[in-house]
Image: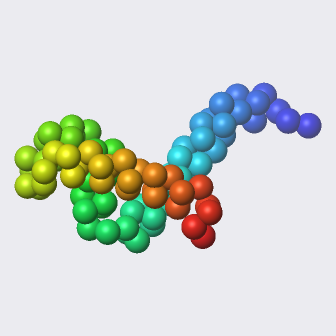
Amino acid sequence: EIGDKEKDLGPVFNNWRYYDEQITQLEKIARCLSKMTCMCKHVLTFSLFLGKSNTEIADIKGYDITTVKSKKHDCLKTLKYMVSGAHF
C-alpha cells in the first residue's frame, strides 16, 4: 500500500515525467536539426530558440527577407516531418 509520503510525491513524479518527455522531445529536435542544411539550422535556431523575427534573421545572417520566410516555412515543414518519426 502507498503511504502518505509517496502520495505526496505524486505531483513531483508527474512533473518529472513531463520534463523528461520535454527533454526527450528537445533531444529529438536537436538530432533532426543536426541533419538539416546550414541555412535551415540558422533560420530555425534563430527563430525557434532565440525568438528572432524574420527581419532580424535576415539582418543578422545577411539573407534576403523573402528567402528567410520561404526557408523558414520549408524547414519547419521538414523538421515536423522528421520529428514525427516518419524520417527515422
Q: Where is residue 45 drawn, in percent x and y? A: 29, 53
- The quadrant of the picture occupied by the N terminus is top right
Horizontal side, residue 33 vs residue 6: left or right: left
**Residue 62 is drawn in which quadrant?**
bottom left
Image point 50% across, 52% down: which residue? 80
Q: Is residue 13 in view?
A: yes
Vertical comparison of 35 with 44: above or below: below
Image point 46% across, 52% down: which residue? 77
Image point 26% across, 67% down: which residue? 38
Horizontal side, residue 27 vs residue 17: left or right: left
**Colour scheme:** rainbow
Q: Is residue 26 in view?
A: no
- In the image, 49 versus 65, the foreground residue is 65
- In the image, 79 versus 34, the foreground residue is 79
Q: Where is residue 30 drawn, in percent x and y? A: 42, 61
Horizontal side, residue 26 vs residue 8: left or right: left
The extreme right residue here reads 1
**Residue 24 is drawn in which quadrant?**
bottom right
Q: Where is residue 28 drawn, in percent x and y? A: 51, 60
Q: Where is residue 78 drawn, in percent x and y? A: 46, 58
